Image (cartoon, coloured by chain):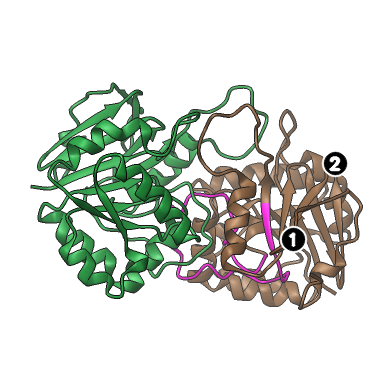
Chain colours: A green, B brown
C-alpha cells in the first residue's frame, strides 16, 4: 500500500524544523527504525543532513543521508523509508535522475515504502516539476518527476497580497497559465498543510485550507481533513 | 553596433503598457518605421499584439506580430526592429527554439538590428533563462537563450518583505543558490529599470537602483545612470 506524506513546507515561521508535522511523521513512520535522507536540493549536504538527523532523532528514528552512501541505489533498496528534503527543485530532480535514484525511489514507494517529501521533495513526488516555485538554476534532463501521485502540487501556495504594487504574476495567475498548457489538476498547498496518502485514500491535513485548480473551472477551497482520494484516480473527477 | 533595450517590466503599477519607457523606446527606435512583435510568452497572441500595437502606434511605429506571419524567419530577416514581450519565459523560449526564431533574431540583433525585450523578453536576451521568476509550465529543449549579453538578468527584482512570515526563498536567496552552481554575474533589475546597450557600452536607466550579484561577493547596489559596460566584456570584472 502506497504511503506518502507530502508536506508543503518543512518549517513554519517561528517554529523549528519539521516541528509542525512531528505527530504526523510519528504516525506515518510507525515501525521504521531508520530513514534515508535525500539532501540534494541544497548545496551543503553535511549541514542539511545534520539538521534533519536531529529532527528525526526526537522521533527515535535514525537518519542516514544518501550523500554519505557509496552505493546510493543499494541504500534506497534497503531503506525503511525515504525523506526528500526541500531546497531547489531543479537541482534536486537533476540529481535524482542522473543517479538513477528517481526510478529506484519510485519503485520502492509504489510498493509501500513510506515516502516523506517537503517542499521540493513534494514537487518531485508528483507527475512533474512544472508547478514548482523555484528558480531553474540547474537544467534537469526532463521535468518529469517520480509520479507517485497523478496530479501536480504547488507547495508554499500563496494568496495574492492586495496591497502589493509589484507587477509580477500572482501564484494564481501562474497556475492559470499552467492550465493554458496542461489538463492536470494542481493542488495549491499552503504553508502548514500536507497530504497523507495511504493506498487509494488521500486526506488533506494540517492547519489551513488548500486551493484546488482544475482546468476550465473556478478554483476550489478545501478544508483541512478533506478526503481528496478523487485526485488519485487515473482520470481525476472534473 | 548592437542596440538592445532590456526592460524589467512592461507596465508600472498605475500606468499604461510601456508608458514608463516611452521616451527610451522613441530614442532606441529612431528611424524604424515598423517593429516585429513576438507575443509567444502569452497564450492570447491576438489580444497581446493589439495591445502592443496600440502602444507603438503612439510612437508612430507600425507593429507587426510574428504570429500573423506565414514565414516567421523571413519576417525576422526583413524586420526594422524586434520586440519580445513578457509573459511566461519557458513558453516563450520553447517557441523561439522550435521555430528557429531564437537563432534568427540573435543573428540580426548581433548585426545591429534594434532589439527590445521586456520581462520574459529580457530573460531570453541573456545567456540563459536560469534566473527567470516564472513557473516552468512548458519544458523547452534547452535553457540556453539568445545570448545577446554575456550575463544573466533577473527582471522584476524584488527586495524581501521584512513583515513576511512566508517561508519560501527570497529573491536574493534564489540568486545566491544560482551562484552555488554558476559563475555568471546576475543583474537584479527592479521594476522601473532597464538597460540600454549600444555596442560595447551599457547603461542602467530608469527610476530605480539595480542590484548586482557576483559569485563570492556581497551584492552591490547600482544607481540609475551607472555605466555597466564592464558586464559586457567576455570575462566580466570580478
Q: Is residue A157 magenta?
A: no
Nearest the viewer among A116 and B222 is: A116
Residue A231 visible at all: no
Query: Which of the 4 image quarters holds residue B151?
Result: bottom right
Q: Is residue B127 magenta?
A: yes
Which image quarter is the C terminus of chain B in? bottom right
Query: Which of the 4 image quarters holds residue A108?
Result: bottom left
Label 2 resides on the chain identified as: B
> In the rendered structure, which segment of residues is drawn in magenta?
B126-154
**Left or right: where A15 falls relative to B96:** left
Residue A59 visible at all: yes
Label 1 resides on the chain identified as: B
User: Residue A199 got which mark?
Assistant: none
Q: Write the residue at 81% across / 75% down.
A: B233
| Circle 1 residue | B217
User: Residue B207 got which mark?
Assistant: 2
Query: Distance of mark 2 from mark 1, alpha carbons?
Result: 25 Å
Residue B53 image offset from top left, x and y in percent: 69, 47
Residue A59 image offset from top left, x and y in percent: 26, 40
Amino acid at each position: 500500500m502506497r504511503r506518502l506524506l507530502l508536506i508543503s513546507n518543512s518549517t513554519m515561521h517561528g517554529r523549528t524544523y519539521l516541528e509542525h508535522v512531528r505527530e504526523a511523521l510519528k504516525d506515518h513512520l510507525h515501525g521504521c527504525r531508520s530513514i534515508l535522507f535525500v539532501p540534494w536540493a541544497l548545496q551543503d549536504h553535511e549541514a542539511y543532513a545534520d539538521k534533519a538527523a536531529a529532527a528525526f532523532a526526537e522521533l527515535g528514528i535514525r537518519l542516514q543521508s544518501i550523500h554519505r552512501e557509496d552505493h546510493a541505489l543499494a541504500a534506497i533498496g534497503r531503506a525503511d523509508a525515504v525523506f526528500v528534503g526541500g531546497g531547489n527543485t531543479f537541482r534536486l530532480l537533476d540529481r535524482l535522475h542522473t543517479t538513477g535514484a528517481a526510478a529506484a525511489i519510485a519503485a520502492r514507494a509504489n510498493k509501500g515504502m513510506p515516502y516523506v517529501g517537503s517542499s521540493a521533495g513534494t514537487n518531485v513526488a508528483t507527475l512533474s516539476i512544472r508547478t514548482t516555485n523555484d528558480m531553474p538554476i540547474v537544467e534537469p534532463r526532463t521535468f518529469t518527476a517520480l509520479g507517485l501521485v497523478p496530479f501536480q502540487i504547488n507547495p508554499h501556495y500563496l494568496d495574492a497580497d492586495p496591497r502589493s504594487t509589484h507587477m509580477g504574476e500572482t501564484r494564481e495567475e501562474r497556475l492559470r497559465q499552467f492550465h493554458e498548457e496542461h489538463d492536470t489538476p494542481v493542488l495549491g498547498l499552503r504553508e502548514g498543510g500536507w497530504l497523507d496518502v495511504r493506498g487509494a485514500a488521500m486526506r488533506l491535513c494540517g492547519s489551513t485550507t488548500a486551493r484546488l485548480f482544475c482546468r476550465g473551472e473556478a478554483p476550489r477551497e478545501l478544508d483541512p481533513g478533506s478526503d481528496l482520494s478523487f485526485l488519485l484516480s487515473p482520470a481525476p473527477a472534473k
